[in-house]
Image: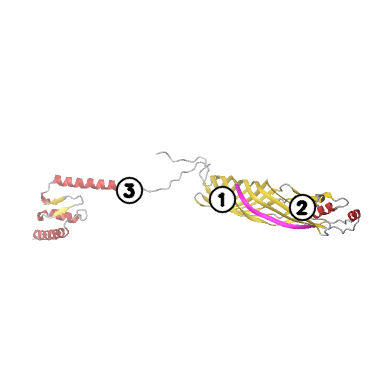
Amino acid sequence: MAESMNKLLFAGAATLAGALVLSHGTAFADDNPEMTNLLRSSAKYNYQIVDDAGLKASEAATDSAPRRRKHDDDRAAKASRTEASRRAAAVSTPFEETTYYPRSGPAGPWTGVYLGLNGGGVMESRQNVATTGLDTYDYPSASNGYAFAASAASSIGLNGGTGFIGGGQIGYNYQINNFVLGFETDFQGATANGSGAAAGAGYTDNAALGASLGVTLPPSTPITLTRAEAGLINFGTVRARAGYLVTPTLLAYVTGGFAYGQTHVGASLLSLDTAGVFAGGSGATSYGSVHGGWTAGAGVEWMFWPRWSAKLEYLYYDLGAPPLGMTGIGNVNASGTPIWAYLATTTPPRFSGSIVRAGVNYHLDWGIPGSILPAAD
């Protein structure tokens, strides 16, 4: 009785499985092993079994053992090939990768040549231009040349002296742990100009001249109006730098060295006799020169992006004073006879002041010791 019941249940299960196969077309061995075994055991119903290798088992009850072993071997070989192909594809999938070539020795990211631009403001120290007059000719029986020369003496304070400065720089850094040593040279144009004016006075009684002419002459009170200007045309430095890395990307440094610049000095003088006894005269001097001095300062530099850094810097400079300027001033009558004359000397200011500027640098791979180059393919 039990055996009859088992056969009945088995036949029902086979019938259900057959219905599933007919409704779905195929049953996949790897998806449901239990179903595969059930269908293989009920091969007498002549259902089709299709596995993932595409092999058909029809009337499996008649399959021989060698055919089943070959089927299993083929499935295993295909699975092995599939896994090998998957791993090979994963390994050989191309992708972009940024390659960095390390530096040997103590050289760090700050080491190497850099170049950049800068701009800021320049403020010259308080400046004065002094003018003096040297009597070179007096009219006979008069001391008018002396009086005019005396009126040319003045000290002129220059107002302003501030302006823009901008240019470029190139330098080299060498990083040793948290310390950065190097040098930098730069050159900038500048628009720092100052100007001022002053007036001086002289005196002569003209008594002797009046007596020689048989007339009475009033005293002469010459005055000289002087206007002076001085300015910085361009400026450059050659400096050493030494700094400490507060963070890997923030450098605080001090700097100092040689400074040079082209300066301009000018003065114009107008001398008049307020008594009207003698005619007036005028003259001017203007010259430029290049002279050197020193500079010192400090700054901070921030590497905000690979190869790029920005800096803020203060410099004090002292270029010394340029040479003296001279011009002759006087008057002649209609016949060409000199009436009076003096030599005006302009003493230029000492060119010194402060610079505050910002800049940006681009860091090159030049000058990096022990650079490792990419290996040849």
For mark 1, give the secondary structure. strand
Mark toward the start of the polypeptide (3 vs 1) = 3
Instruction: Choose mark 2 or mark 1, whichever is in front.
Output: 2
In front here: 258 or 198? 198
From the top left corner, tell me how far across and down residue 100 is, in percent. Answer: 45, 45
| Distance in Å between CA atoms under marks 3 and 1 | 48 Å
In the foreground, 94 or 262: 262
Q: Nearer the viewer, residue 276 or 114?
A: 276
Question: Which residue lies under the disc numbered 3?
Answer: 90
Asked which quadrant contains residue 33, the reply is: bottom left
Residue 131 tag number: 2
Residue with the mark numbered 1: 117
Residue name at image x 15 percent, y 51 percent: 56
Q: Quadrant of the image for the C terminus?
A: top left
Mark 2 or 3, closer to the camera:
2
**Front tag of 3 and 1:** 1
Dot 2 and dot 3 residues touching (CB under 8 Å): no
Mark 2, Cα crowd under 10 Å, few <14 / some 14-19 / many 20+, is: many
SS at mark 3 in the image: helix
Q: In the picture provided, is 139 more to the left or to the right than 287?
A: right
Is residue 187 inside the magenta stretch?
yes
Amino acid under disc 1: Leu
**Image quadrant in which you'd find residue 271:** bottom right
* Residue 230 screen position, x and y as percent: 69, 53
Which amino acid does the dot numbered 3 rest on?
Answer: Ala
What is the span of residues highlighted in magenta in the rendered image? 186-200
Residue at x-position 21% and y-position 47%? 75
Task: List the single residue furthest toward the front.
Answer: 335
Q: Which mark is residue 44?
A: none
